[in-house]
């Protein structure tokens, strides 16, 4: 019997993750637009941009590393932060221009440079010019992100309950998609021989436990190997000869259901950049009267971003490489 190889299984896992992220961010985007709140960017992935398209007031972009997705919703805090970044890059660009004015104004010429060791070399002004242009591009980008578009709302302008709906929007869309695929799995495959009657919440709980093991590279030092991904061990699938092609529809539906449930539950954790953190921050001024210092909030968000990337990378290393 033909079987689905471990490599293709990984591909389908990544597709399930990719679809779940898109659905999640579409939930935020949908409710933000419903309440007429400005969304500056809808992005899939992080890192360098591979493709971007401006549609009305929103930039849609696809980035190099599809491990995350985000929508950039305008708030007073985001406008202020981007304004500060814009001013920093403008200052850096101005200083760079003053130091290299002749080279920037004559990009097609060359200049002689003497290193500290005394070595003399000829260099093109073009690279100096390009660096200056890249600084100006960042100024332009952050100027756009820091400018409030006339006639649009920022999230601070709407009532708290609408803000909460926007932050819950991604979680809600994941719940809808999980329910849809779980019902297909439960009823649609009941006569296929591949019906999975396991409790999905138990499956997700086991998956979270596996992710914790991955973070400390349990498979590297443990005698007994364990599943390395949230969907089970790809290594074990390979040893068993792969997944039968006849089971492919069930496998895909199961992956879509479980991963959307994982996103639904995972995003309640109050760690940035997860939605649980945004929900807590939205509620805290009214209910707990806790004012989080801006520097602490920025550092906390950076830590959360690094943590999310670390979880994703360790999941790959633990199962696909070990």
Image (spheres, helix red, strand yellow):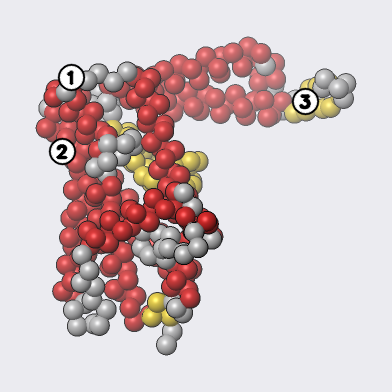
Which quadrant does the C terminus fall into? bottom right
Give how far across and how far down residue 198 sits, in percent: 22, 69
User: Residue 9, located in which quarter of the rendered image?
Assistant: bottom left
Nearest to viewer (mark 2 / mark 1): 1
User: Residue 33, located in which quarter of the rendered image?
Assistant: top left
Earlier in the chain: of badge 1 and badge 3, it is 3
Residue under label 3: 110
Up-down relation of residue 199 to residue 77 (above or below): below
Q: Give the residue displayed 46% in from the left and 64% down from the top.
A: 225
Give how far across and how far down residue 50 sits, in percent: 48, 46
Q: Give the residue displayed 41% in from the left and 18% down from the top.
A: 84
Using the image, tell me which numbered label, if any, was put on residue 289. Answer: 1
Q: Give the residue displayed 24% in from the left and 50% down from the top.
A: 264
Up-down relation of residue 242 to residue 132 (above or below): below
Query: Whole-Å distance between the Cαs marked 2 and 1?
Result: 21 Å
Up-down relation of residue 172 to residue 226 (above or below): above
Residue under label 2: 165
Q: Callout 1: helix, strand or loop?
A: loop
Nearest to viewer (mark 1 / mark 3): 1
Give how far across and how far down residue 81 sits, in percent: 37, 21
Q: Callout 3: helix, strand or loop?
A: strand
Query: Whole-Å distance between the Cαs marked 2 and 3?
Result: 58 Å
């Amino acid at each position: 019997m033909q079987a689905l190889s471990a490599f293709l299984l990984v591909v389908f896992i990544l597709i399930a993750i990719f679809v779940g992220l898109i659905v999640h961010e579409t939930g935020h985007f949908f409710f933000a637009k419903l309440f007429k709140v400005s969304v500056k960017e809808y992005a899939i992935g992080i890192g360098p941009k591979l493709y971007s398209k401006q549609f009305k007031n929103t930039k849609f972009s696809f980035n190099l590393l599809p491990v995350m997705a985000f929508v950039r919703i305008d708030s007073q805090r985001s406008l202020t932060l981007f304004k500060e970044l814009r001013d920093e890059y403008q200052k850096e660009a101005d200083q760079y221009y003053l130091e290299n004015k002749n080279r920037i104004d004559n990009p097609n010429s060359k200049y002689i440079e003497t290193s500290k060791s005394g070595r003399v070399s000829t260099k093109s002004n073009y690279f100096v010019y390009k660096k200056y242009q890249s600084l100006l591009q960042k100024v332009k980008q952050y100027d756009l992100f820091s400018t409030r578009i006339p006639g649009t709302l920022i999230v601070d302008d709407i009532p708290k309950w609408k803000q909460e709906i926007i932050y819950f929007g991604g979680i809600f869309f994941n719940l809808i998609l999980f329910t849809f695929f779980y019902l297909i799995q439960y009823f649609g495959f009941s006569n296929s021989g591949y019906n999975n009657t396991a409790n999905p919440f138990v499956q997700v709980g086991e998956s979270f436990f596996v992710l914790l093991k991955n973070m400390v590279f349990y498979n590297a030092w443990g005698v007994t190997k364990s599943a390395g991904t949230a969907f089970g061990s790809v290594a074990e699938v390979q040893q068993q000869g792969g997944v039968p092609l006849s089971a492919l529809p069930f496998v895909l539906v199961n992956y879509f259901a479980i991963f959307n449930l994982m996103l639904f539950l995972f995003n309640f954790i109050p760690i940035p950049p997860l939605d649980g953190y945004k929900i807590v921050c939205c509620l805290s001024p009214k209910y707990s009267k806790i004012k989080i210092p801006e520097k602490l909030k920025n550092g906390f968000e950076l830590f959360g971003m690094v943590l999310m990337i670390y979880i994703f990378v360790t999941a790959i290393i633990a199962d696909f490489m070990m």
